Amino acid sequence: MKWWMVVAVAVAVVGRADAAGTGRPLTIDLRMRNDAQVPAHVLEQSQDEVTRIFTAAGLAVRWTETPPRFTVHIVAQALGFDRAASQVMGVALRGADGSVAHVFFRQVRDFARAYQVDLSTMLAYVIAHEIGHLLIPGNVHSPTGLMQAEWAKAVVRDAARGSLTFTDAQVARIRASR
């Protein structure tokens, strides 16, 4: 599969934070497009898990076909990050022309195999992590939670159990930035 064949998940953040105490959660609009022939069931399960991850953080997710403000591309592999030993599974970049996060599908697949974790689950957590980079301003890596820079066995175990989450501080930063 060539690197330009992508699965695109487009992400837009709608700034509807709890205005005037309405209690309505911040809504994140997500769009997924499969150009890399990743099996539909893997994408659907990942989509459900991404929704669950953000819902657990008190953030609403709405899947849409509307063009978003942020884009996340899931590429088959990325030059420079395609070594078997590389743990880099994505990169988020902010630019004048928009913000883009790249998720490296081959690395995610290989990582899921190495740790014997469901591929859909691993893909969902990597997508959520990269979206976190687009939603949280500044240096967002932390020693705990979903935004950890390095994912060792304990982090992967938490992801497999569905217990890897954004920390309260990360959720507060997401809300404050919207």
Image (tube, rainbow, N blue to C red):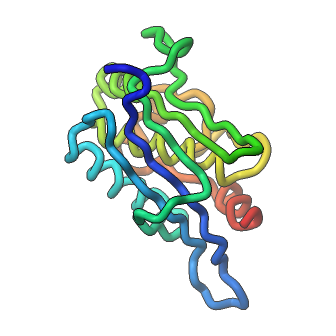
Q: In terms of depth relative to the viewer, which is nearer, 170 or 132?
A: 132
Percent position of residue 156, x then y: 43, 34
The image shows a total of numbered marks equal to: 0
In which quarter of the view is residue 113 placed? top left
In which quarter of the view is residue 31 placed? bottom left
Q: In terms of depth relative to the viewer, which is nearer, 59 or 117?
A: 59
> Left or right of 117: which side holds 134?
right
> Left or right of 94: which side holds 87?
left
Percent position of residue 86, x then y: 51, 14
In this rendering, the answer to whether 22 lies above or below 176 is below
Q: In terms of depth relative to the viewer, which is nearer, 43 or 116?
A: 43
Percent position of residue 45, x then y: 27, 50
In this rendering, the answer to whether 149 lies above or below 140 is above
Q: In terms of depth relative to the viewer, which is nearer, 105 or 118?
A: 105
Point 21% across, 39% down: residue: 39
* Quadrant assignment for the C terminus: bottom right
Point 70% across, 85% down: residue: 19
In this rendering, the answer to whether 167 lies above or below 91 is below
Point 43% across, 50% down: residue: 163
* Quadrant assignment for the N terminus: top left
Point 57% across, 60% down: residue: 12
> Left or right of 172: which side holds 110?
left
> Left or right of 93: which side holds 166?
left
Percent position of residue 42, x then y: 25, 43
